[in-house]
Image (spheres, rainbow, N blue to C red):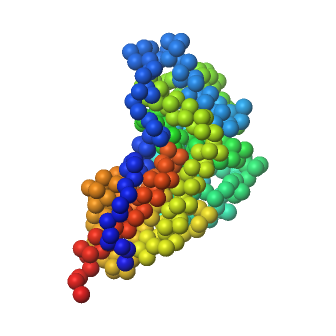
């Protein structure tokens, strides 16, 4: 049983939400003082800020020079939907699902786009499906990192270099924390609200030359809303990839995104961001190895996410509870931590098995993760005492 002793140290920043995520260390609202509020996003100076978001993102992520990157509406969801509705249907498609958001893309493809040649390759929470089943002749839709399951792709070896289909990757909780294999991908999406802790509502859409070719040579047999349209008269809408957004962006959010990107650049770019996330996962892994009540939801260590770390409760008192009792106990554990002001918003995602989800992306200090872990033991002991009959 975990210790019931109240820890002496508290995290300096108790924000461990998986989205919107913690702001960068040292952030204050003063960082947004230069925002072009009340200005048109089409004016020269505000447009230059939008273009800077694109150029800094490209640079930090080491994106190939021949890729296009644009700012799009609707966060990561909007970016993925733009790709699905604009590109799919030219050939068959495989959709990989192992958590909630992948399941959402499968629903879109099968039930809303109603593509006849669509196959869903699924796995339960904590696992990946058999990636060897992916058909390189088909398009492919998949998350790189399962935000709600704590499971990530271990590599891209399973994606064929000579694939005929497009590889459409939802990388919202992977970009800026994991080294994405651009040569194996064709569409990559993310949002500002994840690894760099930006504010919500804006998405990023990155397209390879193969994806651009699809857009310019394939016209889907369905109407496309204005916010999904990436071409004009059969050609790619180049303005989208130069800061000419389809709808009106928040220039306050733009300034915030730039603050995160500039911070990332100052600390050493992608290698430094990855190292910070890896250190956080290492701290949690060392604690899990000695825990008598918690374990990773991800069964294979090579697939453990270093951003959205998902934990399951394996204590005998917990596993003996009925399903509704497990949900209640897990929620009580997260609620105790919130009441103590040591961890906010770390309950498991609503569709995931009951447990905890700790955001450990690059904006989270390892010292805060280390300070949190004894509090997890404390909360688990409190909850166990309320569920285990007195002896």
In terms of image quadrants, where is residue 210?
Answer: top right
In terms of image quadrants, where is residue 135?
Answer: bottom right
Using the image as rendered, state which of residue 115 and residue 188 is in the foreground. Answer: 188
Image point (61%, 30%), residue name: 56
- Indicate the quadrant containing the C terminus: top left, top right, bottom left or bottom right: bottom left
- Residue 115 located left or right of residue 207: left
In the displayed structure, would residue 46 be above or below residue 271?
Answer: above
In the displayed structure, would residue 50 be above or below residue 60?
Answer: above
- Residue 303 located left or right of residue 36: right
Using the image as rendered, state which of residue 385 and residue 145 is in the foreground. Answer: 385
Q: Position of residue 103 (x, y in %)?
A: 47, 54
Using the image as rendered, state which of residue 349 and residue 271 is in the foreground. Answer: 271
The single residue placed furthest to the front in the displayed view is 8
Image point (61%, 50%), residue name: 275
Image point (28%, 70%), residue name: 382
- Indicate the quadrant containing the N terminus: top left, top right, bottom left or bottom right: bottom left
Does residue 167 appear in this view? no
Does residue 235 appear in this view? yes
């Amino acid at each position: 049983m975990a210790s019931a002793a109240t820890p002496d140290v508290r995290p300096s920043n108790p924000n461990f939400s998986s989205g919107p995520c913690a702001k960068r260390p040292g952030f204050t609202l003063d960082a947004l003082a230069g925002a072009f509020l009340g200005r048109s996003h089409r004016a020269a100076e505000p447009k230059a800020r939008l273009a800077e978001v694109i150029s800094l993102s490209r640079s930090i992520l080491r994106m190939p020079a021949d890729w296009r990157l644009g700012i799009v509406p609707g966060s990561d969801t909007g970016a993925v939907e733009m790709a699905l509705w604009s590109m799919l249907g030219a050939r068959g498609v495989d959709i990989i699902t192992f958590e909630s958001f992948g399941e959402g893309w499968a629903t879109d493809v099968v039930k809303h786009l109603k593509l006849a040649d669509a196959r869903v390759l699924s796995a339960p929470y904590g696992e990946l499906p058999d990636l060897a089943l992916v058909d390189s002749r088909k398009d492919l839709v998949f998350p790189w990192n399962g935000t709600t399951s704590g499971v990530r792709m271990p590599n891209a070896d399973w994606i064929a270099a000579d694939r005929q289909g497009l590889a459409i990757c939802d990388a919202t909780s992977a970009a800026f924390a994991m080294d994405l294999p651009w040569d194996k991908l064709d569409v990559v999406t993310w949002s500002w609200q994840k690894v760099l802790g930006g504010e919500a509502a804006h998405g990023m859409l990155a397209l390879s030359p193969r994806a651009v070719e699809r857009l310019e040579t394939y016209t889907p047999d369905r109407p496309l809303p204005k916010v999904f349209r990436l071409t004009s008269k059969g050609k790619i809408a180049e303005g989208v990839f130069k800061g000419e957004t389809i709808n009106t962006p928040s220039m306050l959010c733009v300034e915030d995104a730039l603050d995160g990107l500039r911070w990332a650049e100052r600390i050493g770019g992608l290698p430094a961001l990855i190292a910070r996330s890896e250190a956080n996962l290492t701290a949690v892994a060392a604690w899990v190895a000695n825990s008598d009540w918690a374990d990773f939801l991800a069964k294979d260590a090579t697939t453990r996410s270093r951003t959205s770390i998902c934990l399951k409760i394996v204590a005998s008192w917990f596993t003996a509870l009925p399903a509704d009792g497990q949900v209640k106990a897990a929620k009580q554990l997260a609620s105790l931590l919130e009441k103590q002001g040591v961890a906010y918003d770390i309950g498991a995602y609503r569709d995931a098995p009951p447990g905890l989800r700790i955001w450990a992306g690059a904006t989270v200090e390892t010292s805060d993760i280390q300070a949190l872990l004894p509090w997890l033991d404390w909360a688990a002991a409190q909850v166990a005492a309320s569920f285990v009959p007195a002896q």
